[in-house]
Amino acid sequence: MKRFLIAIVLISVVVVSSCIPYKDTIYLQNKEDGLNDTIPYNLSEVQKPYRIQIDDILNITLKVLDQDNVQIFNPISDEGILNASSEERAYFDGFTVDMRGEIRIPELGRFKVIGLTTEEIEALLKERLLEEQFKETANIFITVKLAGLRFTVNGEVGSPGTITVFKNRVNIFEAIANVGEIPLTGNRKNVAVIRQYPQGQKIHRLDLTDIEIMKSPYYYIQPNDIIYVEPLRQKVLGTGETLVSTISTIASLLAITTSIILLSSR
């Protein structure tokens, strides 16, 4: 009987120690000064301009005084595509950056855009149009935008998948909110952001429980980012996640042990 009691005590200790600490579930904690929970005004990271990558889709709009002269530059969807989603229309109507880092525009030819910002592309297009198509009096106005911010979230989240958000800026919390909250079994302290670079991919780690994350250059996601939330060991072990589930587990173990003792004593 002593052996059974020792075993149940050891198992209970393991189960209790496997509970997920409360502090591991709270976002944006001020870990340096626990008494100061005010977010400093200078905490936000200044986001650097995004530079175009291969497979990005650009929406380009050209406006001049006489719009009839620019119909060829501004694509108009046919009836079938008009019934498609916004993402599908962007794919058909937009200008996709090919493997050479170029886009092809009717009447103007090819443009090398990889590594440029949207503002730099606007200036490049305007310069070419003034050289070949229009005069200064045409009052050219060019808008270049990404056809949505597309990213993927995998791992311990509500609904893993690929999402396209039609915003210019999205932070890591907004990105995760689009696929559901991170459950208790998700590791908020070691979220991986896999980012595309001209030389390849790099993995960056973020601690969502630390308020200092707002200073991180990876706080705002970029197109084609992959966000991965790994599971905590509690999920792998299958032990209690909360105090209630832990008590239930221990109660079940005690009931089983008691039954075994009663059966063996007969």
Image (cartoon, rainbow, N blue to C red):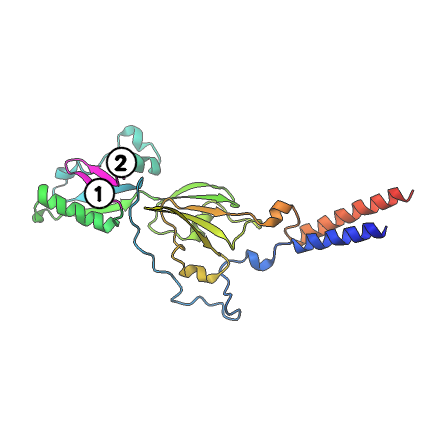
Residue at 13% of width from left, 43% of height from top?
129
Q: Nearer the viewer, residue 172 or 192?
A: 192
Residue at 21% of width from left, 37% of height from top?
104
Query: What's the residue type where badge 2 is placed?
Result: Asp
Please indicate whether residue 233 sits to the left or right of residue 49 in the image.
Answer: right
Q: Position of residue 3 (x, y in %)?
A: 82, 51
State the SS at label 2: helix
Residue at 83% of width from left, 43% of height from top?
260
Image quadrant in which you'd find residue 265: top right
Question: Disc number at residue 93?
Answer: 2
Question: Disc number at residue 187?
Answer: none
Q: Earlier in the sequence, mark 2 or mark 1?
A: 2
CA gap between label 2 and label 1 equals: 19 Å
Label 1 crowd (10 A; few <14 / some 14-19 / many >=20): some
Question: Disc number at residue 112?
Answer: 1
Residue 65 seen anywhere in this rendered image of the structure? no
Residue at 56% of width from left, 57% of height from top?
24
Q: Position of residue 1 (x, y in %)?
A: 86, 50
Please indicate whether residue 69 sits to the left or right of residue 255 in the image.
Answer: left
Instruction: Give the residues drawn in magenta, as a range.
Output: 93-114
Looking at the image, the residue that sits furthest to the right is 266
Query: What's the residue type where badge 1 is placed?
Result: Lys
Q: Is residue 22 magenta?
A: no
Please indicate whether residue 9 sits to the left or right of residue 172 in the image.
Answer: right
Q: Position of residue 64 (x, y in %)?
A: 14, 45
Q: Nearer the viewer, residue 202 or 245?
A: 202
Nearer to us of marks 2 and 1 is: 1
Residue 215 seen anywhere in this rendered image of the structure? yes
Please indicate whether residue 48 sits to the left or right of residue 27 in the image.
Answer: left
Label 2 crowd (10 A; few <14 / some 14-19 / many >=20): many
Q: Is residue 106 magenta?
A: yes
Q: Nearer the viewer, residue 151 or 203?
A: 203
